[in-house]
Amino acid sequence: MYNVMIDIETGGTGPLAPILSIAAVLFDLNTGEIGPKFYAVIDLNSELALGAKPDGDTIYWLLSQSAEVREALTQKPENNAVVLKRLTNFIKKHSSKGLDHVQVWGNGSTFDNTITRTAYQRCGLLPFWVFWNDCDVRTAVKMGRAIGFNPKKEMPFEGEKHHPVDDAIHQIKYLTAIWKRITAPRG
């Protein structure tokens, strides 16, 4: 497996937003098979110390989420650089191809991947993927809708919404359903 779904919970929406928690789930794009999962909570202070920029509206939105989501954001927070190094090592260990081939999927061309890449840069670290392997779930959803297929809304969500692992798995499910539909042999 060399496709990775990244999902983050943040304290903002811009490229400098602090990451509060992060998940990475490896998967097979053709079959939808779920592989190894990574999850960590990042210490907000370590993000702010390096220049991350939170915004009030996002913080208020987070405070309005379920008790489980709020609690998960404070469980065992780790330094941002430590988490990102662990994430890189996790991908190196579990990817079936070298890092130059890892396809990183995020839900929005300027959200998950961009904010994660910026966090790596803030910490003085190289991201584990090359920029030309950034992939966008939202674009795939639009392509699915263009052919009359919208599993994002039709597939039941399993788990806790706004928990990065559960969100990533849900995104994998509807992304791979769209991928299968788009790449199915025509006859």
Image (spheres, helix red, strand yellow):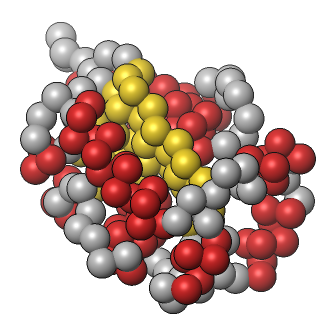
Tell me: residue 141, above or below residue 80.
above
Quadrant into which the C terminus falls:
top left
Quadrant into which the N terminus falls:
top left
Tell me: residue 49, above or below residue 115.
below
Q: Residue at x 19, y 15 (%)?
A: 185
| Residue 117 position within the rendered picture, expressed as x and y whole percent measured from the top left | 35, 68
Q: Is residue 141 left or right of residue 28?
A: right
Q: Is residue 5 visible?
A: yes
Q: Residue at x 41, y 67 (%)?
A: 81
Tell me: residue 80, above or below residue 154.
below
| Residue 173 position within the rendered picture, expressed as x and y whole percent measured from the top left | 48, 26
> Between 2 and 20, which is closer to the camera in this rendering?
20
| Residue 131 position within the rendered picture, expressed as x and y whole percent measured from the top left | 20, 63
Q: Residue at x 45, y 32 (%)?
A: 37
Q: Residue at x 59, y 44 (%)?
A: 164
| Residue 113 position within the rendered picture, expressed as x and y whole percent measured from the top left | 39, 61
Query: In terms of image quadrants, where is residue 11?
Result: bottom right
